Amino acid sequence: MTEIPETQPSPPRASFFGSGAFSHVLPFLILLAIGIALPLFAGGYWGVIAQRACVYWVLAAGLNLLVGFAGQLAIGWVALLTLGAYTSSVLATGNVLPPIHPYLALAVAGAVGAVFGVIVGLPALRLRTFYFAITTLGFATIVTQIALAWTSVTGGGVGVQGPVLPPPFDSQWGFYYFCFGIAAVCTWMTMNVAASRFGRALTAIRDAEVAAEASGISKPGLLVTVFLFSGAVAGVAGGLFASLQSYITPDAFTIELSVLFFIGILIGGRGSVLGPLLGTILLTVLPELAAPLVAWSTFLYATLLLVIVLAMPGGIADLLDFKNRRPLQSNRAIVPRPELLPRLLGEHRNSGKLTLEDVALNFGGVHAIDGLDLTINPGEVHGLIGPNGSGKTTTLNVISGYYAPQRGTAKLGGEVLPALARHTRAQMRIARTFQTPRLVGEASVLENVMIGGTIDGQGTFAESLISLPRHRRDEAMLRENATLALSIVGLERLAAVRTDRLQHSELRFVEIARALMLRPAFLLLDEPAAGLSAEEIRRLGALVVEIAKTGTGVLLVEHHADLIFDICHQVTVLNLGKKLAAGTPAEIRSHREVVNAYLGG
Amino acid sequence: MSMTRRQALTSASAAVLASGIAKPAIAQKSPIQIGYLPALTGPSSSTGVGINRGVQMAVEEINKAGGIDGRQIELISRDTQSDPTKAVNGAAELTRGHKVSVVFGPVNSGEAIPVVPLLAKANIPQLHPCWVDQLADAKKYPLCFRNGPTNQQIGGAANRYVVDVLKKKKVAIVSDTTGYGTASVNAYVPMLKQIGADVVYQAHVDAANPDLKPEILRMQAAGAEAIMPWSVNAGFLSRIINTRGQLAWDVPICGQTTLGSGQTKALLEKPEYWAKVYPNNFRPVCYGPDGKLPERTRAFVDKLRAAKIDMSDTLLWWIAVGYDTPYLIADAIKNSGPEAEKIVAHWNTLKDYPGIYGEYSFTPDEHNGYPDRQVVMVEANSLKDGAFNLAPGYGGA
Amino acid sequence: MLQSIVLSGLAIGSVYALIGVAYNVMYSASRVFSFTAGTLGMIGGILGSLFILRMGLPIWLGFVLALAGGALFGVVTEILAVRPVLKSLDQHLYVLSTLALALMTQQFAAIEWSTEPQPFPRIFDLPRGGFDQTFWLPMLACVVTIVGLELLYRHTLVGHAFLAIAEDNYAARALGLPERNLRIASFAIAGAIGALAGFAGGQLLLAFFANAPLLTFYGFVPVALGGMGNNRGAVAAGLILGLFQQAANFLVGGIFASVAVFAAFIFVLLAFPDGLAGPSTQRRV
């Protein structure tokens, strides 16, 4: 029934961000209750295993934002654990400087972790996925080797004592509650981030990077923030790890440990907090239960990972996602309600004209665009037609900053649009859709639409982390606007549904709703009618006309000549990168060359 | 016939499972639980596998003979997988999941380093054979005893042999880049200097480095008269021996006991390269000048043969130290009682306890129980049934 | 001494280069970087030792079987870890599936073979010393592989098909090329090349399970620096890496040599994210 285009992420995933409904929080409350009550029913041995699970989760919670949400495959994150462990141990035992208080040492470990999180993470901004994965492994090796060699500070192979916390956290259960408390806080913080515009932006970077850029999300800025956070909690986890181990040597920080964190997150499920939490607990506890299999434990983890990737890419979170198993109504229709547009788009926006002046661009000697002039007026639908390869989409990509023209400029209200600065277009209220819808398949429809309004949030990442009022206001505002935008395109009933369950035509309307979240001065639509039924095309046309009426200028790239001639105020015909004709639909319809070339008479 | 590592592992876990069920007739009194943390798998498990053969045999013997005052020994075993984090989990299980009277292990220093302070905190008496100096300290860890040599003793024996017996003053000392290797070199260089040697070359070498020729050439250029390698990596050690052989450089190699292991031997390009290689070993498990093992050891080896325990792929001292430990524990419990303070009090006054691996003595201030005189150097190429001939120079003693 | 460093540097560099070529051959056919590249080298070493030393087979037969084993593992990789995730290439699931397979194989080898390095047989009964087979075998294997691949790609029909696939997957399929069979064949070839690396370098690296992660990393350096899919670049970068590593071992010692190699790799990669050979443009929208 549901047709998913090839470029769409297909694995289903549970959605834990969103409404904050009780059912979302329930599993966490159960875990919290079990965690608090643990000493009542578990012996001291399980207390130690639980300490370990908490410490590992503190690291994995931060890493989850990086791996599960942002899709950055940081396999060697154990490097940060090592750094944190040595920092807190060396400072607390006073190997180099006078000993400092263990809590302070732990805080410093977090700070060092944050700084090095950025250093280890930075290659992600420049390198491809696999390359980045390998460089993190490189860092893990470097850190361990330095710990070995720098004997005067780290104790080399003999190691250094881990920090001993003061009472009441020096006893077995005292230390457990300390770790558990930090783990609970980390869980709460990552849940807050996951349910914020930052969490959604991260998934957009992972699954629909171009759409993230078009929504004004700056990948470097956001990733650096997440590296800071992930590094900081990994550093704290390292300090706790050192206390748990009592004595640390470089031998304790193996690549296997790093792989355990990584696999725990992935079998948990990408883009979930609960799944990786359960995954980390599972991988920590499983080898303790299966003692005879202990030699094969890495083999078993790896097998588990392979099975998950092949058979159940959504991981544990997907197993628990009951909501998205309910069948959807099969004969649902998209009924836009353009009358709601003024409520979302507000007062008349005046930003002047969008113009291209003598723009030229060629790819390896082929002229994609060759000296094109184009003017799009506010409140006007401007059609752009032409055969395949005539430069339509290239034109659109020059405006939205994917290509730098070799000659000429694009201007908005007389101001030059900086070339290649894609994420600045959202600030200028230029929104767009894509030929192939670029959406986060694993997120709900509503969340996808909310991504479009990312730049309108006021709160910072730190405010979201601890759910301060500004964060909550942002979320309420984005939720309200997104619901409105979905009503406008006629999909409000699907708001809570996971996006990869939608039909292709619905995805096109979701993209328009996302674009509307920017309250665009100009809206660039790249073949929005492709794959739509005749009835849907008609409704799309009516919607576009109404959007233009609110003052938005629309650039419509299309093959459907009927649609173009029905709704456009102006039409430009391209051929081989050059303007073949321009004018009103009526003028174009009678243009001899155009008629001969493709309207086919 | 021969016991592979995996069989050893299964039998160890089977012993744990079976011990509760077997021999219901004798098991009227509750068994005495002894915690055991061997490394039976993972990268440094050769030692653990050897030790395990001795431990299993001794426990079986003691139980067959009626246990300790009628109480069977129940070995609670956790494989540490040569991984410090698993060792910590294992120690927690032994001390908190079970109520063991005493713990033997871990058997690798890397795993003992975190476990020793943890057991000290849990007030469980501990016996381990690990070498790192800091791992037995009567003041810091009053319940922890070492029934093996310290690094100081190991290095001291090798250093004395090179300087005093072989009369080589210019020494090249190398290790791999593991914690054990780097710590050893850092500790031995000052010791060598103290006894008048000249350390002309010192380095930590990546054990994965496939070609050590430049390294050996540099030692040669520095004028070294002896090579002292410290590593448990058979690949690394064999490359040193092979390269010396290829260069036909006639200097002795003196160092870690693994220089004489079967694993190292298997990697030699020519058997004759093993000449003039002198690894550490222990006098009670070495062939004397008469080519015979000491009386007690000979009887022990006969028992091993009768029990069909393989000695060809391991070293006799590994089995011996494993074999001695349950007896040391049984002796303390039998004579003083199973409570922690009684076991500790017993060991604190132990004098020349006759084991196979050696004679052990402890005092309240000295928990390093292995005597200096028993740490010796041997001839690597005399390996036979896991034991060696004493190196030239020890003959008279 | 310099001669010795150069000799071993070029020899070990040849092994890295061959692993890099194995990476490339898999990449060209599938756009997938596989964590199993180093595993192939490990397999070549262990199977060589197993067949020739433990089972006593003739050397030529052991050689053929080791390569066949590598090729088989390549095919298994394709079926188990690559094909199922190809349709969602932009999600990078291949990183996880190939990592999983590599870890499984490595752990299996550690338990069933040995955690200690095992001896690898002498291939030719020649006197030892000087320019020994330990060193020239990997170099020879490298040369033979490169020449062989060039001949295959340039002068055979199948080779042209491989190139077409590497150039443009979709277009090649549209032309009616049996894309899937060609991909399987590529993985088999990559498997044989990886096993050849492990076999030819066996006397150098021994039959050791821990060679897998080592070669996975050091074999990727030539790919990253030589430019992906560029075999000549990989060979050049592999040889440079081998020389650099041996020189660093010699100059700064074992601990800092690996730090130097990793750090240099990361810095060079950050400076030239598309390899020293230059970028390849990609259309994204």
Image (cartoon, helix red, strand yellow):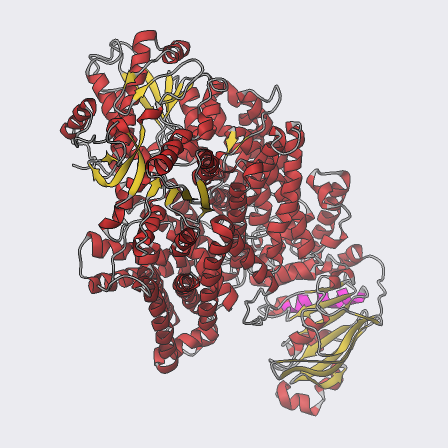
| Residue at 26% in and 12% down | B68
Image check: A258 left or right of B281? right
Count all numbered tags in the image, as a single digit.
0
Q: Is residue C274 above or below residue B265?
A: below
Q: Is residue B68 above or below residue B6?
A: above
Instruction: Work out whether residue B143 or residue C149 is closer to the camera in this orientation and state it.
Output: B143
Question: Residue A314 at what x, y percent from top left?
Answer: 49, 48
| Residue at 42% in and 54% down | B221
Instruction: Give residue B126's quadrant in the image.
Output: top left
Majority secondary structure in the magenta region = helix
Instruction: Work out whether residue C32 or residue C261 is closer to the camera in this orientation and state it.
Output: C261
| Residue at 73% in and 49% down | A478
Q: Would residue A539 be counted in the magenta stretch?
A: yes
Q: Residue furthest left?
A: B306
Q: Is residue A129 above or below residue A382?
A: above
Task: Give the magenta range.
Answer: A537-549
Q: Is residue B309 visible?
A: yes
Q: Quadrant of the N terminus of chain C?
A: bottom left
Instruction: Give residue C144's quadrant in the image.
Output: bottom left
Question: Residue A490 at what x, y percent from top left?
Answer: 67, 57
Question: Residue B179 at what x, y percent from top left?
Answer: 46, 39
Question: Residue B265 at what x, y percent from top left?
Answer: 26, 46
Instruction: Work out whether residue B361 or residue C264 is closer to the camera in this orientation and state it.
Output: B361
Q: Would residue A121 be counted in the magenta stretch?
A: no
Q: Quadrant of the C terminus of chain C?
A: bottom right
Q: Is residue C87 visible?
A: no
Instruction: Work out whether residue B75 or residue C141 is closer to the camera in this orientation and state it.
Output: C141
